[in-house]
């Protein structure tokens, strides 16, 4: 079924790589007008080139550092002014978290940047998009928690990452409550291990850690960005207009075990 997002104005952060790129391209293929952003000019331009080669309605504002309130405002207002409304906001971008145990994690240099890069940037984008949804037909906000909002890791220290993703999950429920009267829906996706530049750089493709990750999966492969994008497509479309405040694990069955 094509055109599931026909005529929708969709903002997708982090379109330069990984899950954000997979979602941005899938949304545009389904008829959305996609306005992405990324901190990396080079990656964003490569994504735009891929989309344009397919003739998709896909542009990017870059470089945007979503941890900086002025950058967030510039990106969101650019899209809002151009189209008069925002129908979909996907907060896929996150800075790579500092993966360390409690005893080794530095508060200023590691805990704070992880929180800002996983939690604050979601709040900032939602706040900036709000006036472009309220009174403009509402909208669908999709945020990214993680299986690590529900379970810790015996492989790697990740105390700040677990806290950050649980914060996104809790914040999203409250956004759903505050958004309901305005027709704004908000849901989270909690991915398991997906093959993206950040996870592949963390030794998850081969070796002992990769073997342990695969052991936990009921479906014995790592995720692809498209596995996640199909879930986001449902949540962004009018097929899910009665779905809000929900969390969708897309994780190869990790949370079942
Ligand atoms: N990949 C996984 O296994 C996995 C698992 C659970 C949750 N998640 C979550 O899913 C989301 C997407 O993950 P991913 O693996 O595709 O990420 P990624 O690191 O592969 O890509 C993130 C993109 O965001 C951009 N970015 C980073 N910091 C930015 C900033 N400050 N401003 C603007 N852009 C910035 C990067 O340049 C990159 O293009 C994240 O929220 C992540 O925490 C991912």
Image: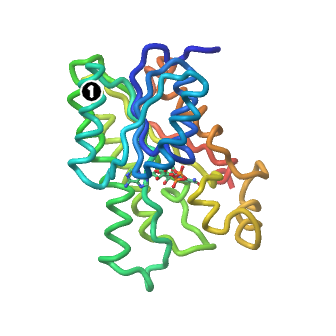
Q: Residue at x 48, y 22 (%)?
A: 57
Residue 175 spot, x, y in % from top left: 30, 38
Q: Residue at x 26, y 19 (%)?
A: 84
Residue 181 spot, x, y in % from top left: 25, 24
| Left or right: residue 18 compared with residue 7 | right
- Quadrant placement of the N terminus: top right
Q: Is residue 26 above or below residue 64?
A: above
Q: Residue at x 66, y 53 (%)?
A: 254
| Left or right: residue 5 compared with residue 91 | right
Q: Residue at x 24, y 33 (%)?
A: 77
| Left or right: residue 72 compared with residue 237 | left
User: Closest to the observer: 111 or 23?
Assistant: 23
**Residue 100 seen in this snapshot:** yes
Residue 16 spot, x, y in % from top left: 50, 45
Residue 208, by quadrant, is bottom right
Residue 216 spot, x, y in % from top left: 72, 60
Q: Is residue 192 above or below residue 56?
A: below
User: Closest to the observer: 17 or 168?
Assistant: 17
Q: Helix or strand or loop: what does disc 1 sit on? A: helix
Report the residue marked by disc 1: 80
The verdict on label 1 being within 8 Å of ligand 1 is no
- How many numbered discs, if any? 1
């Amino acid at each position: 079924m094509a055109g599931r997002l026909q005529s929708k104005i969709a903002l997708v952060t982090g379109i330069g790589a990984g899950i954000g790129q997979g979602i941005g391209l899938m949304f545009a293929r389904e008829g959305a007008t996609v306005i992405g952003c990324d901190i990396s000019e080079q990656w964003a331009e490569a994504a735009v080139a891929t989309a344009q080669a397919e003739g998709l309605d896909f542009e990017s504002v870059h470089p945007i550092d979503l941890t900086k309130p002025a950058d967030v405002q510039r990106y969101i207002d650019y899209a809002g002014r151009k189209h008069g409304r925002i129908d979909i906001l996907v907060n896929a971008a996150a800075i790579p978290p500092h993966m360390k145990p409690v005893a080794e994690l530095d508060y200023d240099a590691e805990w704070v940047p992880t929180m800002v890069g996983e939690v604050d940037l979601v709040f900032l984008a939602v706040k900036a998009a709000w006036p472009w949804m309220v009174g403009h037909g509402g909208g669908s906000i999709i945020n990214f928690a993680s299986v690590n909002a529900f379970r810790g890791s015996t492989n790697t220290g990740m105390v700040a990452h677990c806290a950050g993703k649980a914060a996104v999950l809790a914040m999203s429920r409250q956004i759903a409550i505050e958004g309901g009267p305005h027709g704004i829906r908000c849901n989270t996706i909690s991915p398991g291990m997906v093959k993206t530049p950040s996870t592949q750089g963390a030794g998850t493709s081969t070796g002992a850690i990769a073997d342990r990750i695969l052991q936990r999966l009921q479906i014995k492969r790592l995720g692809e960005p498209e596995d996640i994008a199909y879930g986001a497509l449902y949540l962004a479309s009018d097929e899910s207009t009665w779905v809000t405040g929900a969390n969708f694990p897309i994780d190869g069955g990790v949370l079942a075990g």
